[in-house]
Image (cartoon, rainbow, N blue to C red):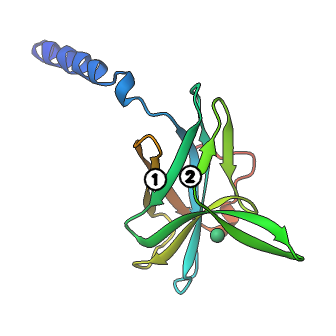
């Protein structure tokens, strides 16, 4: 097996050279999940914790997923005795802070499903930032009852 080592070392070196600051991801996504919905549901929700470990604010301008016709970022607000969902044109993650998209609050609204989506599947969501960065985040489809209780670890 020793003859493989030079190649392996080269591959590791090349990998570390390519992962320079220019390609470093500015945001960290944790615990991305989506509650399973009935097959006829016109929308699904997506939840995730987003951390900005950097020193500059990062603005998410777009979210998309090939399984849905449209993806929006919504906030919930109490208005006239009702909870209303308000579409956000963008989502700013302040430098050094974390924002949680969670049940009852801000969420990803996955609209116009293009197919039936079942638990156990992964939704391939892409977030785009104002700086032109594109970040892929897999959202795991789980039963409604899987609501995070103090963070689930796999
Ligand atoms: Cu919504």
* Residue 66 sits above or below residue 7 on the image: below
Where, quadrant-wise, is the C terminus in this rendering? Answer: top right
Q: Which mark is residue 80?
A: none
With 123 as the anchor, is 152 left or right in this view? right
Q: Residue at x 57, y 82 (%)?
A: 38
Cα separation, mark 1 vs mark 2, equals 7 Å
Percent across and percent down for residue 13 are 24, 15
* Residue 70 sits above or below residue 137 on the image: below
Number of other residues with Cα within 10 Å of mark 1, as a class: few under 14, some 14 to 19, many 20 or more: some
- Secondary structure found at label 1: strand
Q: Which mark is residue 138?
A: 1
Q: Residue at x 52, y 83 (%)?
A: 39
Quadrant hosting ligand 1: bottom right
Does residue 94 show up?
A: yes
Percent across and percent down for residue 19 are 33, 24
With 67 as the anchor, is 37 left or right in this view? right
- Secondary structure found at label 2: strand
Q: Nearer the viewer, residue 120 or 49?
A: 49
Where, quadrant-wise, is the N terminus in this rendering? Answer: top left
Q: Quadrant of residue 102?
A: bottom right
Q: Residue at x 57, y 29 (%)?
A: 56
Q: Quadrant of residue 85?
A: bottom right
Q: Nearer the viewer, residue 138 or 121?
A: 138
**Is there CB contact under 8 Å for labels 1 and 2?**
yes
* Residue 66 sits above or below residue 54 on the image: below
Mark 2, ligand 1, within 8 Å: the answer is no
Number of other residues with Cα within 10 Å of mark 2, as a class: few under 14, some 14 to 19, many 20 or more: many
- Reading the image, the residue beneath label 2 is 32
| Badge 1 or badge 2: first in the primary sequence | 2
Q: Quadrant of residue 101?
A: bottom right
Q: Specify the farthest residue to the bottom.
A: 40
Q: Residue at x 60, y 50 (%)?
A: 91
């Amino acid at each position: 097996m020793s003859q493989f080592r030079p190649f392996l070392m080269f591959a590791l070196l090349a990998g570390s050279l390519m992962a320079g600051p220019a390609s470093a991801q500015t945001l960290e996504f944790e615990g991305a999940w989506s509650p399973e919905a009935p097959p006829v549901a016109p929308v699904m929700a997506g939840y995730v914790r987003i951390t900005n470990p950097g020193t500059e604010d990062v603005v998410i301008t777009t979210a998309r997923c090939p399984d849905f016709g449209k993806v929006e970022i919504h906030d919930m607000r109490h208005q006239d005795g009702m909870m209303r969902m308000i579409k956000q044109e963008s989502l700013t993650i302040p430098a050094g802070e974390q924002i949680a998209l969670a049940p009852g609050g801000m969420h990803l609204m996955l609209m116009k499903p293009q197919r039936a989506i079942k638990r156990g599947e992964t939704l391939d969501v892409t977030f785009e930032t104002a700086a032109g960065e594109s970040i892929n985040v897999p959202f795991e489809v789980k039963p409604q009852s899987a609501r995070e209780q103090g963070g689930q670890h796999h």
